Image: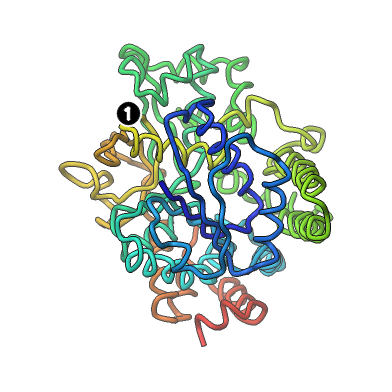
Amino acid sequence: MKLVIAGGGGFRVPQIIEVLSAAREGKGPHSGLNVDEVALYDIDQRRLDVMMAVIRGMDFAHPPTLTASTDLRQALTGANFVFSAIRVGGTAGRVTDERVALAEGILGQETVGVGGYAYAFRTLPIAMELARAVREVAPDAWVINFTNPAGIITQAMRRELGSRVIGICDTPIGLVRRVSAAAGIDHHWVDQDDPRLTFDYVGLNHLGWLRSLELDGTDRLPDLLADDAALDHIEEARTIGFEWVRALGMLPNEYLFYYYLNRESVARIRQEKATRGEFLDKQQSAFYDEAAGASDHDAAAAWTRVHDEREATYMAESRDEEDRANRRDEDIAAGGYQQVAFDLMNSLTTGTRARMILGVGNSDADGDLIVPQLREDAVIEVPCRVDADGVHPQHVRPVTGPELGLITTVKGCEELVIEAATQGDSTLAWRAMANHPLVDSVAVARRVLEGYIDQSPQIAKVFE
């Protein structure tokens, strides 16, 4: 079985190879998954060379055969699975996304609001090239999309590849696992589709809510929300605040921090010496420079050091200063994006049934639309059962009230982003930015868009 990683020079690639090596050795949660060939594709030969050196230096016991190429169609030939993990513009592009927005006093986070839309404008043309190449060279391959903003990119790629494109994110299922553990429930029941445990989660990428967690027919969420000690084990509750999650009566995805505490988050970010993008740009630039001239062993050691620092500082702006240096083990136990991707691959190839929260089409479930207020092609995140026959989204309770309003507004903006990039229409892009809930002025939205076009050649090219 062949896996292609588009964005194969990216920093997280060694984590993927580590899991595959363990699986080929019969170890770990994916011991039945046998990927014997991995092709790394990237436009940057230097980054590919560094990743190959890091992987060699890690000396995995049973790694798959590994190749690296800057030729997309060559890499895709014979692919069974494709990971879309591209970062158009690199970390430097992320810095621009952040700083242009922050200069106008609004959030520039790479998946939420105008920063995410800038990232999408750069990325959509390249993502669609990838989708067309997959359709031509490997039409039966499953595409698992890591690329942010994941909801937008997945929805656009499905225009070419239909339901064989699945969006993934580790935050929703990580939330369910943490809540299960806090409620004293074996978190493995979540993934193994144990009938004793059911849950209701609905939303968009980085915008969703866990609304119930039922064990043997009894919803455990109300008791958990009333218990400070239990909530203290849930990062989302600590981040957003115990009183607010109680007021909601549900647990939000961690990225709703940027909506519920927008003023505070922007103020914190503006007070920092460096944005998250600037931190990563400096860190990763230094890493690739160091590793490019190092032995395989030293390249691997440098990667491990940088990876640990990166994980410990994830979403640091959402935590009090004294808590920023390190995250609790329980907060990072979900396994990351690669864990979700391999859970999905494992079920599709071995037939082992699993339950996951995935980015799928609103019309992919049997019967009516999952969220009737959204378009058929809208990509949403809901619980799914996965087996050898494919991905089977589940219907959820109706979405109502402010949550419905937020979902429909943000999804409407995302669809404007796709059309703006597809048509090269800057007016549609302005509308998308101006109508986002975190933007309070159409004039600000216009200036931000002009700033992105002025400072990002890749965005300027979309709207030239």
Which residue appears at 43% of the width and 32% of the height? 210
Give the camera-side residue of 336 and 181. Answer: 336
Q: Is residue 197 left or right of residue 174?
A: left
Which residue appears at 65% of the width and 65% of the height? 90
Q: Residue furthest bottom?
A: 464
220 vs 289: above or below? above
Give the camera-side residue of 214 and 404. Answer: 214
Residue 270 is at least partly visible in this image: no
Which residue appears at 34% of the width and 48% of the height? 360
- Location of residue 119 (image quadrant): bottom right
Residue 370: % across, % down: 26, 44
- Location of residue 50 (image quadrant): bottom right
Q: SS of the residue at dot 1?
A: loop
Q: Which residue is mark 1?
A: 353
Give the camera-side residue of 105 and 99. Answer: 99
349 vs 161: above or below? above
Q: Is residue 218 left or right of residue 247?
A: left
Residue 20: % across, % down: 53, 38
Residue 332 is at least partly visible in this image: yes
Disc 1 marks a residue whose amino acid type is: Arg
Give the camera-side residue of 195 and 438. Answer: 195
Residue 96: % across, % down: 68, 68
